[in-house]
């Protein structure tokens, strides 16, 4: 999710499409939160690790 968010951020920035930029920011933030939760040992979605 984090990688997809960054890809959408780059595409949105290059093409100037603000919708892609917004969706990219949202996905990157959610992916970062899930990654941090998984890294500190909290279960995310029933899994011990989130990749």
Image (cartoon, rainbow, N blue to C red):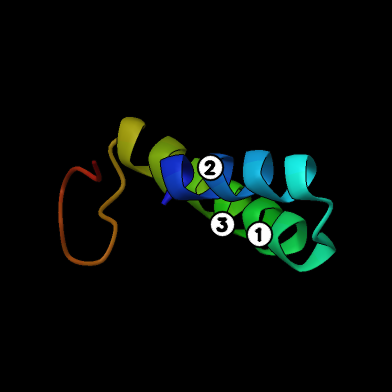
Cα–Cα gap, marks 1 and 3 = 4 Å
Q: Which label is found at residue 27?
A: 3
Q: Could you tell me which residue is drawn at 45 percent across and 49 percent down?
A: 4
Relative to 18, 39 lies left or right:
left
- Disc number lying in front (2 or 1): 2
Labelled pair 2, 3 in contact (Cβ < 8 Å): no
Residue 26: percent from the left, percent from the top? 66, 59
Q: Could you tell me which residue is drawn at 64 percent across and 46 percent down?
A: 11
Check the image and report above or below for 8 versus 7.
below
Q: According to the image, label 1 marks what residue?
A: 26
Asked which secondary structure carries label 1, the reply is: helix
Question: Hey, which quadrant is residue 44 in on the image?
Answer: bottom left
Relative to 44, 33 lies left or right:
right
Residue 45: percent from the left, percent from the top? 25, 66
Cα–Cα gap, marks 2 and 1 = 12 Å
Residue 50: percent from the left, percent from the top? 25, 45
Residue 46: percent from the left, percent from the top? 17, 65
Q: Which label is found at residue 10?
A: none
Asked which secondary structure carries label 2, the reply is: helix
Cα–Cα gap, marks 2 and 3 = 10 Å
Relative to 16, 47 lies left or right:
left
Q: According to the image, label 2 marks what residue?
A: 7
Labelled pair 1, 3 in contact (Cβ < 8 Å): yes
Q: Nearer the viewer, residue 23 or 44?
A: 23
Relative to 31, 9 lies left or right:
right
Circle nearer the N terminus (2, 1): 2
Q: Quadrant of the C terminus?
A: top left
Check the image and report above or below for 14 versus 18.
above
Q: Nearer the viewer, residue 32 or 7?
A: 7
């Amino acid at each position: 999710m984090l990688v997809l968010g960054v890809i959408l951020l780059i595409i949105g920035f290059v093409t100037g499409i603000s919708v892609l930029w917004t969706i990219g920011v949202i996905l990157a933030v959610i992916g970062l939160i899930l990654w941090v939760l998984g890294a500190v040992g909290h279960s995310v979605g029933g899994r011990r690790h989130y990749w």
